[in-house]
Image (spheres, rainbow, N blue to C red):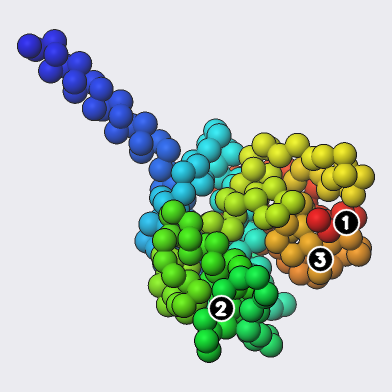
Amino acid sequence: MKLYAALLLFALVFLLESVTAQDVTQVISRDLFETMFKHRNQFYSYDAFIAAARFFNGFGTSGDFTMRKRELAAFFGQTSHETTGGWDGAPDGRYAWGYVFIEEQNDRQAYCDGGWPCAPGKNYYGRGPIQLTHNYNYKQAGDNGAIRRDLINNPELVATDATISFQTAIWFWMTPQGNKPSSHDVILGRWSPSAADWAANRVPGYGVITNIINGGIECGQGPHPASGERIGFYKRYCDLFGLNYGPNLNCRDQRPF
């Protein structure tokens, strides 16, 4: 009986240690989050991020500890650009100003594309960390098993519920988009470029993630300020995580997908 109890206790300790080791909180603490986003909008809370991340198996928990940190540095690098409030000469530098804006600041459009549902009076402009845009993205994100919310009829949830807001960004990160790989697979080194990708100079690295997210505007046309800003945020977070930057940060010589 004592042996059975000892084995049971050992099994429980092993299980708890395994779960803890794979939790995203082991990669980014509350203090580090506060340092990374010291000027953020308080809507984007640490608790909301952690709650959202735990809905997606493998996000920030795949590979060795260095790989986990690199995924979060890349995710935050891209989403910080999407939500940036920084400027040249900003206190603490322009790359300390990620996660300032919740909704699109420029010309807001309905983004209601044919073939997908739209709700009367609802618009599908950019919201949340990834600035989720277009009715088809709201539809697919909402239908995802991790979210399961009607974002077609309630797109404003992405700007009013912080956990859902982070969930939509992580959904986009984890999900292949058309002929594009997922950003998750790219940063983990799980993506193998096709012959067409090699011909287009789409090679593994942070730059191809920019291509996935906004390649039609930022890639294949030489240096672009938006792409450069994405790199600037990424480098800052790599520094905070104690990482090297890795290869192929830019997409300026890549043809868009």
Point out the residue furthest to the front here. 115
Task: Report the residue marked by disc 2.
Answer: 118
SS for callout 2: loop
Q: Give the class, few, some or many, for how many residues have Cα within 10 Å of label 1's Cα (few <14, many ≥20).
A: some
Task: Report the residue marked by disc 1.
Answer: 255
Q: CA distance from mark 3 to mark 1?
A: 8 Å
Residue 189 point in image, percent of width and height:
68, 37
Q: Give the class, few, some or many, for how many residues have Cα within 10 Å of label 2's Cα (few <14, many ≥20).
A: many
Residue drawn at (64%, 43%) of the image: 185
The C terminus - image quarter? bottom right
Q: Choose between 34 and 166: the one closer to the eye.
A: 166
Q: Are marks 2 and 3 in contact (CB under 8 Å)?
A: no
- In the image, which is nearer the foreground, mark 1 or mark 2? 2
Q: CA distance from mark 1 to mark 2?
A: 31 Å
Q: Earlier in the sequence, mark 1 or mark 2?
A: 2
Q: Is residue 149 left or right of residue 178?
A: left
Amino acid type at image mark 1: Arg
The N terminus - image quarter? top left
Task: Report the residue marked by disc 3.
Answer: 216
Q: Is residue 162 left or right of residue 196?
A: left
- In the image, which is nearer the foreground, mark 2 or mark 3? 2
Q: CA distance from mark 2 to mark 3?
A: 24 Å
Q: Are marks 1 and 2 in contact (CB under 8 Å)?
A: no
